[in-house]
Amino acid sequence: MNPLPADPTVLHPMPGQPRVVQLQPLVTSPLIEVGAYSYYDDPDDATAFETRNVLYHYGPEKLVIGRFCALGTGVRFIMNGANHRMDGPSTFPFPTMGGSWADHFDLLTGLPGRGDTVVGHDVWFGYRVTVMPGVRIGNGAIIAAGSVVTSDVPDYGIVGGNPGKLLRTRYDDADIARLLAVAWWDWPAEHITAHIRTIMSGTVDDLEAAAPQPG
């Protein structure tokens, strides 16, 4: 058995599977932050994640994704740059088309934004999930395939549908508090390596017992 943890700096962690990329070594935009081991799976071109999956990202809002997140094919993050004016007869963004229309660019400034889009740790996104601007998704959440996430998702929530609705939580409030206190995603990689089976299939009691001891 290999005693060494997986390497978070390797772009393609699965040999012979270029469709899977770890996002931390891939992204270059200062407006995108991704934690270690979070990955994206796409048979077409997973390495194009920044341009194909993070849309209308004209700034300054950030996309922040935690550690150990799994992103299925076609997951899209819609950023605040997608906003259009809605207070007049037309929503068309005339100034972006150039020419003399650009003289009216002030009509597009100061549009309301929802701030950064923030994804916690250990979040699983199913196939073709769409996340709308400014949404915050809690740790341990599951987003069902095809969902459109329009509002915040609690820790360990399971969301599905369009618009996405909270179907249930994976644990009760007391156990969620315990899981957040343990925060296994912050453990040293070597300690995670020693307790993979507990992290994947153990109970909350097991996870607490496996946590690193202070000092």
Image (tube, rainbow, N blue to C red):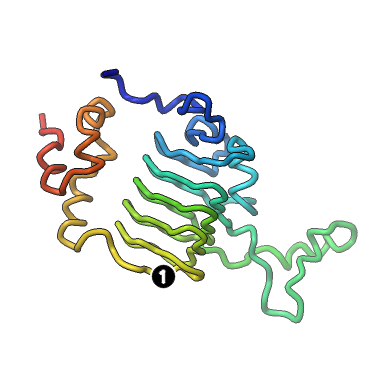
Q: Is residue 163 left or right of residue 168?
A: right
Where residue 71 appears, as percent x and y from the top left, is 47, 46
In what element is the residue under mark 1?
Answer: strand
The amino acid type found where label 1 is placed reads Lys
Which corner quadrant of the image does residue 56 belong to?
Answer: bottom right
Which corner quadrant of the image does residue 190 belong to?
Answer: top left
Query: Going 51% across and 35% down the picture, which residue do you hit?
Result: 20
Q: Residue tagged by mark 1?
A: 165
The quadrant of the picture occupied by the N terminus is top left
Where residue 169 appears, as percent x and y from the top left, is 28, 63
Q: Is residue 32 left or right of residue 86?
A: left
Which residue reaches farthest right? 99
Which residue reaches farthest bottom? 89
Q: Is residue 111 left or right of residue 96?
A: left
Where residue 125 appears, as percent x and y from the top left, is 45, 52
Query: Going 49% across and 24% down the picture, which residue do you hit?
Result: 15
Vertical order, 174 against 60 (above or below)? below
The quadrant of the picture occupied by the C terminus is top left
Q: Is residue 146 left or right of residue 104?
A: left
Query: Going 22% across and 59% down the picture, which residue do you hit?
Result: 171
